[in-house]
Image (cartoon, rainbow, N blue to C red):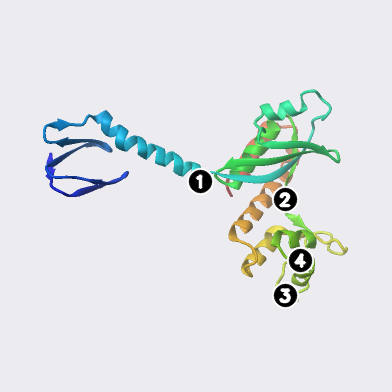
Amino acid sequence: MRCLRAGFIRSRAGVLTLGEDCFVRCIRRMDVRFQYGAHLETQKTMQDRFVEPLTDATTATREMKMKTYNFTIIASGIDPNTSDFEDRFFEAGCDDATITFQKGAIILEFDREAKSLGHAIQSAIANVEGAGAHVEHVEPDYLVSLSDIAVRAGVTRAAASMYANGKRGSDFPAPVARVTTESALWDWAEVASWLYRYRRISLRDVVEARIIKRANLSISSREPQRSRPNARRRTAEVHVLHFA
C-alpha cells in the first residue's frame, strides 16, 4: 500500500482526485478501495461510482458510432399478391424498410442503423434473401446520367454537361455505357472521385459511391449461384465486408 497526499491518479475512467491521508490500494483494473481515516468504502460502492459510469460512457460512445444509412434494394422472386408478402420481409428482419411493388419489382427502401454503409447493405441483403427474395441490385445506382450527376453534385444540368465536355475542369471520366447515344451513362464512383478532387462533394460521398458500386458488382457476380442460396450468402459476405 502506498500513501499519496493531496495528489491525483489517472485511470481509464478519468482523473481521480485524492485528499489528505488518502490511501489507495490498486487490486485489479478499476477494482479500487479508498480509505479515509477509519472509514472504508466498499468495493461495490466504488464500482457504482466509477465502473458503471464508465460502462455507460462506453455504451454511449458505441451508440454514437452507429449511423443510419438510407439505400434501396431492388428484389424479385416473391408474388406481391400473397397474403404474407409483407410479413415475410418483416419477420426476416426488414422492419426498417418501406416495401412497395413497382414496375414488376419489389422495392425496399431501408433506413438501417449500422457502423458502416457496407455493413448496413450486407445485413439488408441477408435479410431480403432470408425472406426468400432475390436481390437484383442496390440503389442509388452507380451508373448515372448527366441529370443524375447534377442532382448528386448539387449543380445544374448545364454545369454537369460542361464538366463532361471539358469546359470546366479537365480529365472528366468517360461514359461507360450507351456511349454512342444521347443518354450516355457514367460510373458514379469515378465521377465522385473527380468531383471530390474539385471540392464539389465530400470524401464520404466518394467512399459510399465505391461501396455501392462494389455491392452491385458482387450481386452481379453471384447470378450463376442463384440456385445455391447458402453459397450466395457467403459470397456476399466476402465481397461486402472487405470494403465496409
Q: How many marks?
A: 4
Residue at 13% x, 45% y is 20
Badge 1 element: helix
The part of the image, by quadrant, that contains residue 41 is top left
Question: In the image, which is nearer the foreground, mark 4 or mark 1?
Answer: 4
Pointer 4 with pointer 1, Cβ within 8 A:
no
Contact between labelled residues 2 and 3, with CB atoms less than 8 Å apart = no
Q: Residue at x 66, y 36 (%)?
A: 96
Residue 23 is left or right of residue 201, and the answer is left
Observer-side mark, 1 or 2, equals 1
- Would you say 117 lies left or right of 179 here? left
The mark nearer the N terminus, 4 or 3, is 4
Mark 2: secondary structure:
loop
Q: For marks 1 and 2, give the CA distance.
A: 23 Å
Q: Residues within 10 Å of mark 1 (few under 14, many from 20)?
A: few
Q: Earlier in the sequence, mark 4 or mark 1?
A: 1
In the image, farthest residue toward the bottom: 167
Residue highlighted by disc 3: 168
Quadrant of the rendering where the N terminus is positioned = top left
The tag on residue 140 is 2
The residue at which mark 4 appears reads as 156
Q: Secondary structure at mark 3?
A: loop
Q: Nearer the viewer, mark 4 or mark 3?
A: 4
Seen from the viewer's position, the closer of residues 153 and 77 is 153
Name the residue type under label 3. Answer: Arg
Distance from disc 2 to disc 4, alpha carbons, whole Å, reads 19 Å
| Labelled disc at residue 65 | 1
Residue drawn at point x = 80 percent, y = 23 percent: 83
Extreme residue toward the top, this view: 83
Residue 103 badge: none
Q: Residue at x 59, y 41 (%)?
A: 113
